[in-house]
Amino acid sequence: MGGVGLMGSAAEFRWDRVAFWRKKRNLSQRALGREAGLSGSYIRLLELGEVKRPSIQTAASLALALGLPVSELWPGARPLVQPDDPELLDIIERSGVNELPEPRRTDALRLLVEALDAKRRTEDVRPPHHRAAEDRPSYGSKPSGC
C-alpha cells in the first residue's frame, strides 16, 4: 500500500461515522467539504457509501476537519507518531504542556499527538525512521536509462 503507511483496508473505513460527527458538529456537507478540502457532493457520496476506495489523505483530512483522531473514522489505523518521536518531544518542550495540571496535561498531550499524526497523514510527511527502505533516496545510483 502506498501513501503514508496507514494499516487497514477501505472496507474498514467507517463512513457512517463521518455523517454522525458532521451532524454532531452542526456542519453541512458543503461546510465539512470546505474544511477538509473536498466538495460537498463528494461528502454526500462518502456518506452514502458510494466511494468504494477512499484515499488515506481523504480520511486524514476528514478526521482533522472534524477534530477527531483518524482511528475514529478508520479503526484499523496505526499511528505514525510514537511517544519517543523527536518532533513530538520538541513540541511538548516548547509548548509548556508538562506544566499543566492533570487531567488537562493528559488531554493536551493526546491532542498534540493526534494533531501531529493528522498533519503527517495529510501532508505525507514522515520522519526518516518511518519510511520504508524503498522510499528513501538513493544517492549513489544513476537514474534508469543512463
Image (cartoon, helix red, strand yellow):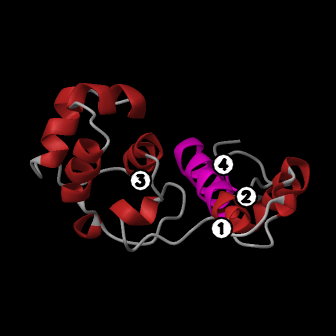
Three-letter residue code for mark 4: Val
Query: In the figure, residue 146 lies in which quadrant?
Result: top right
Earlier residue among tags 3 and 4:
3
Q: Which residue is mark 1?
A: 132
The disc placed on residue 56 is: 3
Earlier residue among tags 2 and 3:
3
SS for dot 4: loop
Question: CB of mark 3 within 8 Å of CB of mark 4?
Answer: no
Q: Which residue is mark 2?
A: 136
At 64% across and 43% down in the image, what residue appears? 145
State the extent of the magenta-drawn residues as a range.
110-126
Question: CB of mark 2 within 8 Å of CB of mark 1?
Answer: yes
SS for dot 1: loop
The disc placed on residue 125 is: 4
Q: Position of residue 61 (x, y in %)?
A: 44, 43
Q: CA distance from mark 3 to mark 1?
A: 17 Å
